Amino acid sequence: METWSTLTLFDREMREHARPDGPGVRVERVGDVVRRTGAADDWNGVVWTAPDLTPVRAEAEIAAQVEHYTALGHDTFEWKLYAHDSPTDLGERLTAAGFEAEPPETLLVAPVADLPRDVALPAGVRLRTVTDRTGVELMVRAHELAFGTDGSRLRHQTLARLDSAPDTLVAVVALADGEPVSSARMELHPGTGFAGLWGGGTAAPWRGRGIYRALIAHRARIAAERGYRHLQVDATDQSAPILRRLGFTALSTTTPYVYRTTPQVLTRRH
């Protein structure tokens, strides 16, 4: 895989020409940024900045986005900063403006054709596709067990997506004796070659048994069936080694810079 050309394609298709990720969410290019704006429970934030962004223009854009989201009454929003974004001190400028940096993640991409698609699960574990409220509740329980965070936003966003655009979301939960132990999602972006993997997490007692790998293979198989060329993941330090062994390549790193008007539960996407 040609790393730089793939990164350029990712920036263009997934960031500069980002799509709404839920009903009522709008995507706008304003000045030197592309931003998503929705309701308070949606993901709100900046997804792209102009590659020639100067320090002076960066200061103006930071102030403009803070004004935009706070005027809407949003308690939090995110500026999704990539390591190759300009200017090179943009992270420092965001911090000075009151944003808080969350742990960075690695942007990993793999050609779908190169990924394993055999779903090998431990004995007694089965996969359930999430298509209704019952499935969403199982997925939220698995998410909370895996990450230790509240799943209210995940519940809202998944139900909204299943209701408005079910063909753009693949959600699955792994069950052991009927109990949720792992879950994962894949967001499909029609008109692009990319599908995004999100939320892959397994409850601690079930880690190390191949469930995470099986969920990757399950989603890779579906992505291939639907004609997508690349899978993309924002990977934590815990999942990145597994993904690299499966054939994913690091293209950049991404750091969520979160602006909060009051202390809140993190809006970060898992």
Image (cartoon, rainbow, N blue to C red):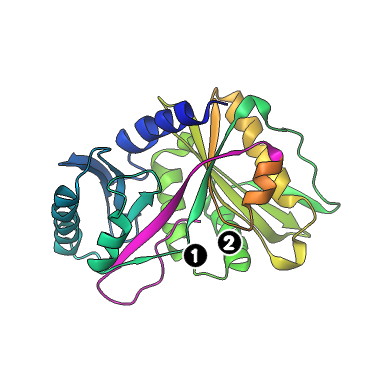
The x, y position of residue 33, in whole percent, is: 23, 43
User: Within the magenta stretch, is there residue 180?
Assistant: no
> Which quadrant of the figure contains the N terminus?
top right
Which circle marks residue 143 in the picture? 2
Residue kind at label 2, given as amino acid type? His
Hey, which residue is sitting farthest top in the picture?
Answer: 227
Is the C-beta separation of discs 2 and 1 under 8 Å? yes
At x 49%, y 65%, the residue is 151
Which circle marks residue 43 in the picture? none
Residue position marked by numbered label 1 in the rendering: 151
Extent of the magenta region = 246-270
Of the pair 170 and 205, the residue shown nearer to us: 205
At x 77%, y 34%, the residue is 118
Hey, which residue is sitting farthest bottom in the picture?
Answer: 263
Q: Secondary structure at mark 2?
A: helix
At x 23%, y 38%, the residue is 52
The x, y position of residue 168, in whole percent, is: 46, 36
Cα distance between the residues tagged 2 and 1: 7 Å
